[in-house]
Image (cartoon, helix red, strand yellow):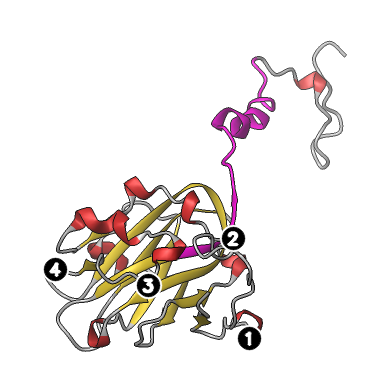
């Protein structure tokens, strides 16, 4: 298997420089690869020459080096790719192959759990984390700060500029992390519903400290 390397922002962990899953079939890749947990049909690419190719850059591990399928920016060198997951993800790393040469994005900015970001509002937002992208034909592995990505249901990647040309090109986007199923809505709201009463009776409640001590419930 290929040896992928981490880049960016002090988040690099030397222990991850070399593939830690020797012996796994090539098509499987790292054990925590989230390919199967991505809602590929709803991946969105903004300012792409062919927006329909957005889902195509979410490739299986064994196709990560493929250069036949890619997304390229259209009007300028900015590109937004939004990736939804099928559950909640504790993100560990972003996998990225871009380029070639000056078509490589200068950096990538990560925005978790923000719906419908476009170019008009993303410029005024501070990313949760961003990475500088070196030129090269390998897949870069960018380790995020896990405490900032503990419960990710979607992530928006913003590529603000290329490294010198008029367009930006991205071949492959992948993620490493832990996936869990999102709880049903009725389970989320059930604990809240139980605190309400249809007709509260003050006599059933303890008095609040500091209130008038001579007050008593009606009928007492």
Badge 3 density bin: few <14, some 14–19, many ≥20, Cα 10 Å:
some
**Residue 205, image quadrant:** top right
What's the mark number on residue 193?
none
What's the mark number on residue 74?
4
Q: Secondary structure at mark 4?
A: loop
Frontmost residue, 207 versus 123: 123
Q: Residue at x 24, y 68 (%)?
A: 68
Mark 4 vs mark 1: which is more N-terminal? 1
Q: Is residue 201 above or below residue 34?
A: above
* Mark 4 vs mark 2: in front: 2
Residue extent of the magenta highlight: 174-198
* Disc 2/disc 3 C-alpha distance (Å): 19 Å
List the residue tagged with mark 2: 32
Frontmost residue, 44 versus 18: 18
Q: Is residue 128 visible?
A: no
* Disc 3/disc 1 C-alpha distance (Å): 23 Å
List the residue tagged with mark 1: 14
Q: Residue at x 86, y 29 (%)?
A: 214
Q: Tell me the quadrant of the picture where the C terminus can be found.
A: top right
Badge 1 density bin: few <14, some 14–19, many ≥20, Cα 10 Å:
few
Q: Secondary structure at mark 1?
A: helix
* Disc 4/disc 1 C-alpha distance (Å): 37 Å
List the residue tagged with mark 3: 65
* Mark 3 vs mark 1: in front: 3
Mark 2 vs mark 1: which is more N-terminal? 1
User: Residue 204, percent across and down?
Assistant: 81, 20
Q: Residue at x 64, y 15 (%)?
A: 198
């Amino acid at each position: 298997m290929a040896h992928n390397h981490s880049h960016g922002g002090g988040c690099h962990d030397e222990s991850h420089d070399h593939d830690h899953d020797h012996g796994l079939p090539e098509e499987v890749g790292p054990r925590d690869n989230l390919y199967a947990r991505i809602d590929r049909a709803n991946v969105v690419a903004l300012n792409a020459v062919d927006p329909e190719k957005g889902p195509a850059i979410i490739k299986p591990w064994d196709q990560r080096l493929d250069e036949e399928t890619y997304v390229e920016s259209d009007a300028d060198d900015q590109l937004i790719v939004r990736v939804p997951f099928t559950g909640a993800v504790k993100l560990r790393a972003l996998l990225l192959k871009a380029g070639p040469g000056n078509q490589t994005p200068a950096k990538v900015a990560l925005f978790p759990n923000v719906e419908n970001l476009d170019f008009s509002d993303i410029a005024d937002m501070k990313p949760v984390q961003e990475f500088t992208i070196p030129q090269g034909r390998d897949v870069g592995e960018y380790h995020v700060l896990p405490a900032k990505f503990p419960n990710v249901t979607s992530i928006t990647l913003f590529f603000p500029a290329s490294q010198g040309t008029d367009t930006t090109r991205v071949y492959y986007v992948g993620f490493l992390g832990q996936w869990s199923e999102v709880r049903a809505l009725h389970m989320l709201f059930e604990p809240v519903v139980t605190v309400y009463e249809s007709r509260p009776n003050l006599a059933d409640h303890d008095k609040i400290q500091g209130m008038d001590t001579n007050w008593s419930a009606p009928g007492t």
